[in-house]
Amino acid sequence: MPTKKKRGNPFRGVLDMMSEMNRISDAMASLETGTAQPRGYSDAWSPPTDIFARGSDLFIRSEIPGVQPEDVEVSFSNGYLTIAGERRRDDADVVYYASERFLGTFRREITLPEGVEEEDISANFDDGLLEVKVAGAANSAGPSQIEVRSRKRRQ
């Protein structure tokens, strides 16, 4: 009986470490202060994101409720997909007694497999869910192992 070859995860370890650290920092800061602090790109909050394969295509879904479509930017450069934008307060005349949602700029960078071209990428945004499709990227090989050798000569 033939066995089905299990596909490895080519994205293991390639999510942007700074995005993950910022997400953890945001969660801790809002627990301590009870309010979100204004942020720039250097310390932007990171939206929760799923990366998954459907057939041969790769999908990236980010939750960004309360963000207007004109405040979302998806870009691709040098193998990196960047999801960025801003969540604004829509009610300036309101006094908040508690505010747990992250506000201000957000940013998430994801390394895409080698060989992805701009024309392979499409994005849709509806009801606070951004979905980016990268055609054909799910079948990409994962990272290759590089042999480490000693500089010392063997005698």
Image (cartoon, rainbow, N blue to C red):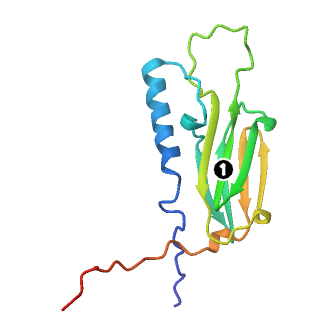
Residue 72 appears anywhere in the view: yes
The residue shown at (64%, 33%) is 105
Q: Is residue 59 placed above or below 25 in the rendered structure?
A: below
Q: Is residue 109 placed above or below 72 in the rendered structure?
A: below
Q: Is residue 96 placed above or below 141 in the rendered structure?
A: above
The residue shown at (56%, 37%) is 42
Residue 72 image-quadrant placement: top right
Q: Secondary structure at mark 1?
A: strand
Rendering coords of residue 44 (x, y %):
58, 35
Quadrant where the C terminus is found in the figure = bottom left
Left or right of residue 103, residue 154 in this image: left
Rendering coords of residue 142 (x, y %):
53, 72
Q: Out of 103 and 60, give the one closest to the viewer.
A: 103
Q: Out of 6 and 132, give the one closest to the viewer.
A: 132
Q: Amino acid at mark 1?
A: Thr
Residue 54 image-quadrant placement: bottom right
The residue shown at (70%, 21%) is 89
Please give the residue where the numbered disc 1 appears in the rendered image: 82
Rendering coords of residue 153 (x, y %):
24, 86
Q: Give the crowd class for mark 1: few <14, some 14-19, many >=20 residues within 10 Å.
A: some
Q: Out of 85 and 63, give the one closest to the viewer.
A: 85
Residue 55 appears anywhere in the view: no
Left or right of residue 82, residue 142 in this image: left
The residue shown at (24%, 81%) is 152
Number of numbered discs on residues: 1
Rendering coords of residue 6 (x, y %):
52, 76
Outermost residue, left side: 155
